[in-house]
Amino acid sequence: MTNYVNKLLENLNEDIKLKPDEWSRERMISAGNKRWITNILPAELLSRSVKQAVESLVTINESGEFYETFPDIIETPKYDDKWGRIANYIEINNRAIAEMEGERTKNGILSSIKLLPAIPPSAKSWANCIILSQIFPNIYGDGYNKGPFEENSIYGIKLNAGYSGNIIDYDINMTAEEQFLAFNDLAHLHGLKTGFRTVISADQIKVARPYADDEVFRWDNAEHQEMFIEEHVRLIKMGFEAVFIDSAKHIGGYDMENYAGVGALPEYAQMQYILHEIRSRSGCTSVSFAGEKSTGDFARYENLGLTTGTAFVPPDNYDKVKCWAEKLKYNRNYAPGVEVSNDNDEGGRSYEDRLNRINSILFGYEYPSDKLPSFMQMEDLFPLRYDTNTHHLMMTNPSYSADGTPLSHWENLFTKDDGRAYNAKVGELFSYAMNL
């Protein structure tokens, strides 16, 4: 059996022998046996080496046992197959935190590994799940950053083209699949579930062909549908257990007057088949499918095969969150979720309002088993600089480096001392909730 974390370290010219990480111990917050790094700025983690990140995760892992080499077998955090029904989904824009060196963008998966120690692990009663914003190549400018107002959207993807040059380290002798497996082993050790964002608007998907022009994706093309299924099955087999589906509300032509995507969407029965096939072919019955704004007609989305949807329950009102948790507690297959913020967030929300929303999602229920699912963005843990926002970083890929180095980009992407203080307060909220 291949130890993918050790393989990654070796390919980065690192020794696989690990030592306790005192830097992490000094910055660690504990809630029972749950431990993570808080009161930090992301650049402090992103500027460390991958080996230091591995040592950090091994040092703070919840078993309390220190591993001198990374274990050969790591299992996903254990919950039942319906874990996604009450999970907290935290989307990390792995492209935004990638290494910006000159005009190149690369190695986002390595940056995601480095950030893991600062993500609160799952609680006793519910999971925290990381959603990676980018997996597939984006249609325009993949592997490069552009000016802050030049389009370089994550929402336009290529299938049959491997994985994004923004994310994978293509300079080492390790496949993209192996790099994802290493990431997932490290996330699982830290007590996290993992998933990724996908798109279903046909004109936002291209099919790559060797020695030929790209094709526009079409849902009425049986080969394209099969490719979509197999691309997602392949990722589930690498250890991802959740898929966030952009524009899911409008599947089957529903509420199209509010549709903001580009191109046709799958028919309702067609998407039922697709989600069933992804679960069946991957052999992972616990896959959680979260749909963007797939709320309101709960039966419609539950019967579609979704686990949860966004933007139904008002997040600023703790009492309403708790009330909806009570109303929906008997449906264990599907529930709408509560948002702290989403991928369309244009910033401007105060720290106090964000903390109030996090309080609502973590405590708005009578019993932990009744909890509603929730959705957060990277900015809800690590505030972004004031002249950008989550949606801007989904639509564009600017470097904020003042000198062309990755470190300068990381230092300038996020806020400074006020962001550190905010991150500490988020850590306190999670620590109170961790053992419920």
Image (tube, rainbow, N blue to C red):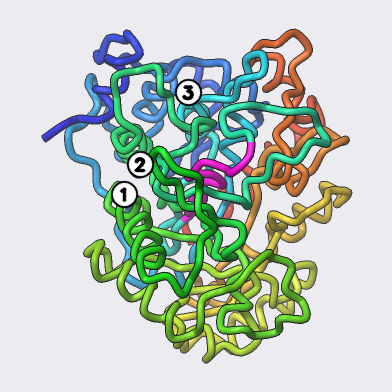
Residue to which mark 2 is pinned: 184
Residue appearing at x 59%, y 80% in the figure: 325
Residue appearing at x 38%, y 40% in the figure: 210
Q: Is residue 133 magenta?
A: yes
Mark closer to the observer (2, 3): 2
Q: In the picture, residue 58 is in which quadrant?
A: top left
Residue appearing at x 52%, y 67% in the figure: 290
Residue to which mark 3 is pinned: 25
In the picture, the disc for residue 85 is: none
Indicate whether 239 appears above or below 15: below
Total labels drawn: 3
- Looking at the rendered structure, the kind of residue marked 2 is Asn
Q: Quadrant of the N terminus?
A: top left
How packed mark 3 is, by other alpha carbons closer than 10 Å (few <14, some 14-19, many 20 or more), is some
Nearest to N terminus: mark 1 or mark 2: 2
Residue toward you, 138 or 247? 138
Q: Main secondary structure of the magenta part?
A: loop
Residue span colored magenta: 128-140
Nearest to N terminus: mark 2 or mark 3: 3
Residue toward you, 273 or 129? 273
272 horizontally vs 30: left or right: left
Q: In the picture, residue 88 is in which quadrant?
A: bottom right
Per the model, the C-alpha gap separating discs 1 and 2 is 6 Å
- In the rendering, at what x and y percent does residue 20 appear? 36, 17
Residue to which mark 1 is pinned: 239
Outermost residue, left side: 1
Secondary structure, mark 3, is: helix
Mark closer to the observer (1, 3): 1
- Looking at the rendered structure, the kind of residue marked 1 is Gly
401 horizontally vs 30: left or right: right
Secondary structure, mark 2, is: helix
- Looking at the rendered structure, the kind of residue marked 3 is Arg
